[in-house]
């Protein structure tokens, strides 16, 4: 059974446009769930003497009004319920508040060794966003130049429209489901751009091959 996408292009256009309208609306009114890489915050990497659970750590953090902190167990087993290694990501807190958190964790959860303590400033997050946007826009211009030289300018315009849609769909998905954006998201977005370009070139090669046997009387 053959399924023709081209014959049903209106359906796919309608689905894409509808999702983009909803996604852009979400980005404008709901925004994004920015991680501490963008907003700034604190990272505490602790190694407990005995395995601890996420709920044990969160109970202590709730007492310090940090119940929304991200707590990750450092374990090779993705289904592990407890671990000695714990990575805690919080919003911006003072050195005094962080020291109080660690003191309470030691007294209520157990003794631990500090592996890493870092503060991520919001300035770094702003620079990260700026560099990501510049990288994506630069990829668009380079793509236009490359496709224009290899194919035609109208091919390049079509490729940029497809690439913009790929980026907007990804951003819309993260905004709609309120998924956290961090530095790894930037790398993932650039990967999407790379695969989009690669797929576009493959399709355009196929179109160019078909154009060679294209009859003048055909549209």
Image: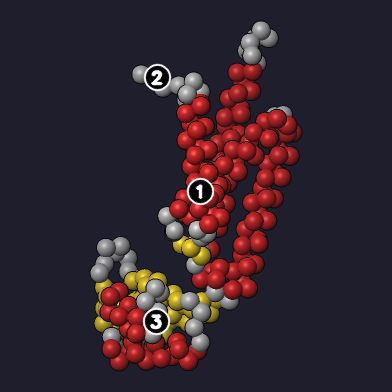
Q: Residues within 10 Å of mark 2 (few under 14, many from 20)?
A: few
Query: Residue 116: percent from the left, percent from the top?
Result: 46, 81
Q: Is residue 202 above or below residue 84?
A: above
Residue 205, compared with residue 185, is above or below; it is above
| Residue at screen point 64% across, 51% down | 136
Q: Secondary structure at mark 2?
A: loop
As drawn, the label of residue 65 is: 3
Question: Left or right: where does residue 65 sit relative to residue 161?
Answer: left
CA–CA distance in space, label 2 to label 1: 31 Å
Q: Secondary structure at mark 1?
A: helix
Residue 74 screen position, x and y as percent: 35, 71
Q: Quadrant of residue 219?
A: top right
Q: Nearer the viewer, mark 2 or mark 1?
A: 1
Q: Within 10 angstroms of label 1, few (less than 14), some, or many (20 or more) residues?
A: many
Going from N to C along the chain, the mark reached first, 2 or 1, is: 2
| Location of mark 2 (residue) | 2
Q: Is residue 119 above or below residue 21?
A: below
Answer with left or right where residue 138 lies relative to residue 76.
right
Q: Which of the two labelled residues, at mark 3 and mark 1, occupies the earlier sequence position?
A: 1
Among the two numbered marks 2 and 3 on one chain, the one whose residue lies closer to the N terminus: 2
Nearer to me, 33 or 26:
26
- Residue at the (41%, 85%) spot, across then down: 114
The residues bearing labels 3 and 1 have C-alpha atoms spaced at a distance of 32 Å
The crowding category of the residue bearing disc 3, from other C-alpha atoms within 10 Å (few below 14, some 14 to 19, many at least 20), is: few
> Which residue lies most toward the top here?
217
Instruction: Tell me if residue 188 can be seen.
Output: no
Asked if the residues shown at circle 2 and circle 1 are in contact, with their CB atoms under 8 angstroms apart, the answer is no
């Amino acid at each position: 059974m053959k399924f023709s996408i081209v014959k049903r292009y209106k359906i796919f256009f309608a689905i894409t446009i509808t999702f983009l309208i909803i996604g852009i609306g979400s980005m404008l009114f709901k925004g994004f769930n920015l991680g501490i890489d963008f907003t700034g915050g604190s990272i505490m990497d602790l190694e407990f003497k005995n395995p601890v659970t996420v709920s044990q750590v969160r109970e202590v953090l709730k007492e310090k009004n940090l119940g929304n902190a991200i707590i990750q167990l450092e374990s090779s087993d993705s289904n592990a319920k407890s671990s000695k290694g714990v990575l805690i990501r919080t919003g911006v807190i003072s050195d005094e508040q962080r020291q109080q958190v660690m003191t309470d964790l030691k007294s209520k959860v157990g003794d631990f060794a500090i592996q890493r303590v870092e503060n991520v400033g919001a300035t770094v997050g702003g620079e990260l966003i700026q560099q990501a946007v510049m990288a994506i826009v630069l990829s668009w211009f380079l793509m236009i130049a490359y496709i224009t030289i290899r194919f035609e300018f109208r091919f390049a315009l079509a490729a940029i429209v497809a690439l913009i849609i790929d980026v907007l769909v990804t951003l819309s998905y993260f905004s709609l489901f309120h998924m956290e954006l961090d530095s790894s998201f930037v790398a993932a977005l650039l990967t999407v751009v790379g695969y989009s370009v690669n797929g576009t070139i493959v399709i355009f090669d196929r179109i160019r091959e078909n154009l060679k046997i294209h009859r003048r009387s055909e549209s």
